[in-house]
Image: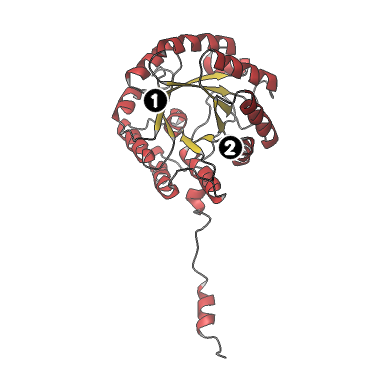
Amino acid sequence: MTKRLYIQDVATRDGFQIEASFVPTDAKIALIDRLSQTGLAKIEVTSFTSPKAIPNLRDAEDVMRGIKRVDGVEYTVLVPNVRGCERALSCEVDEINLVMSASDTHGLANLRMTPEQSLAQFREIIEVSRGSGVFINASLSTTFGCPFEGELAETRVHELTERLLEIGVQGVTLCDTTGMADPAQVERICRASLQRWPEAVFTAHFHNTRGMGLANALAALNAGIDRFDASLGGLGGCPYAPGASGNICTEDLVHMFQRMGLETGVNLDVLLEAAATLPELIGHDVPGAILKAGKSDRRYPKPKWMSETVESGATR
């Protein structure tokens, strides 16, 4: 049986939050509705953060309430605090995604909180969400390295994973926030995580900052990971992480997995149609490769001179 993979797009949250200009609410809704028709397993719709902190996502409620939900697609949102959790629950989201850093320095730069402070806040959020039936996921930033502190001890990553699961988190996303990971490290950490906590839901989240995003996704796959975050067009990046370019590109990731004969559930042609709308929507080109080059089964007409040679060739 072909292994089923779950592709989760984060463009309208992780991507749009750092764009230079505000993407209109109706355009956000239209793009999410298009993505809902592609076969993606999950869409990270928006973030219930203070509009002052992330003005590009100040329309979180309007977007979440305006989309047309499709059966089989999970709609998740980022929640930074209890107030954000209450706002998200009022919109009947499927999943709440919490974010913390494995690095003290990055946590203070990004969230103004150490990992210990993040865990304390998570407990409050989980208590508020109790009984709602909403899935609780936590994204562990800088799992594979911090731009300020360098490589983190893998024991630290596993310690924080264990503490997250102990307080009621159901899923953990292992995040390569600034593209510092390498395939050997990714396979080692992912394999150990799956072996230690087989009941937990693990997701891999990679950035392509140093061109190793797809290689790292393949390493995670080899370790047993079956859920992957990616961003349409390769949008995104952490505003508080120097040098962090966009996430791995959703259509590039899907293309790779499908070429390998793996089942993603995604209609790549429909996904590419959605990606093609991005440059006009955000006002600049996007780094996705398949959108530019086409799928690997794309064929081109032979040079004209070759056809002419055949037509005028000698007969036997």
On the question of residue 108 being in view, the answer is no
Q: Amino acid at mark 2?
A: Asn
Mark toward the start of the polypeptide (1 vs 2): 1
**Vertical arrangement, residue 261 with respect to residue 50, above or below:** below
**Vertical arrangement, residue 96 with respect to residue 280, above or below:** above
Specify few, some or many for label 1: CA neighbours under 10 Å numbering under 14, 14-19, or 20 or more.
some
**Vertical arrangement, residue 22 with respect to residue 249, above or below:** above
Residue 132 as seen in the image, left or right of residue 193: left
User: Cα distance, mark 1 to mark 2?
Assistant: 28 Å
Q: Amino acid at mark 1?
A: Asp
Q: Residue 60 location, x and y as percent?
A: 35, 24
Image quadrant in which you'd find residue 56: top left
> Of residues 263 and 138, which is closer to you in this image?
263
Q: Residue placed at 42% from the left, 32% from the top?
A: 12
Q: Which residue is mark 1?
A: 94
Q: Residue 51 location, x and y as percent?
A: 38, 19
Q: Residue placed at 63% from the left, 41% from the top?
A: 215
Count of numbered labels shown in the rendering = 2
**Mark on residue 208?**
2
**Vertical arrangement, residue 113 with respect to residue 262, above or below:** above
For the C terminus, give its image quadrant: bottom right
On the question of residue 217 being in view, the answer is yes
Q: Nearer the viewer, mark 1 or mark 2?
A: 1
